[in-house]
Amino acid sequence: LSALVHSHLIELGENIRHGNTNTYKLFWNTSRYGRPDEPKVEDDCRDALLELLRGRLKPLDIDAQPEGYYADDKRADIRVSFAGTGGFNVPIEIKREMHPDLWSAMHSQLIKKYTRDPGANGNGIYLVFWYGGEKATTPPKGVDKPASAKELQDQLVAMLSSEERRLIRVCVVDVSKSE
């Protein structure tokens, strides 16, 4: 389930960045002329992505819901599930590039709080919205400031142990302004 959802997120990311409908604007507040102005808040970005993802997953009888509940009353940004409450699920934790916990939330939230759910079996997806890097959170010591969505994704994957890489997938969606 995790691999399938990750694959759809990668395809959605490609369509958002390179499609001919300017889908990246769904993640921006726009001026009265329709030009991207300021990044939308995280929950609005999640909701936009969730609608796009649901269109792909629903025909497969896979459910995707916002604010999925996990142990200790913790909530992942999205919970994707198959076969109901007793089936499989994949928590998706979302951050924007400017979030102060960008570099730590993959471990402190996704892995520590959500992937321990028995239905997740250790699996999860960490998704980041890339707005071009201008407002990106300063990386930890020893890590260069990323210059692209791909570079950020590679840096986040490098922060995972080899065991974690088998279970955690990283997806950085480039929603930066079109040039």
Image: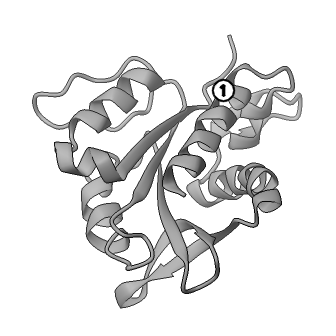
Residue where numbered disc 1 is placed: 14
As drawn, the residue found furthest toward the bottom would be 72
Please say if 103 is above or below 50.
above
| Residue at 48% from the left image edge and 65% from the top image edge | 91
- At label 1, the amino acid type is Glu
| Residue at 62% from the left image edge and 31% from the top image edge | 175
Relative placement, left or right, of 143 versus 156 is left
Q: Where's residue 36, x and y in %?
A: 73, 30
Q: Where's residue 149, x and y in %?
A: 46, 25
Q: Which of 35 and 114 is in front in this view?
A: 114
As drawn, the residue found furthest toward the left would be 142
Relative placement, left or right, of 111 versus 18 is left
- Give residue 146's quadrant in the image: top left
Q: Where's residue 82, x and y in %?
A: 63, 71
- Give residue 107's quadrant in the image: bottom left
Q: Where's residue 5, x and y in %?
A: 59, 50
Please say if 109 is above or below 71.
above
Q: What element carries label 1?
A: helix
- Give residue 156's quadrant in the image: top left
Label 1: how many residues lie within 10 Å, few (<14), some (14-19) or many (20+)?
some
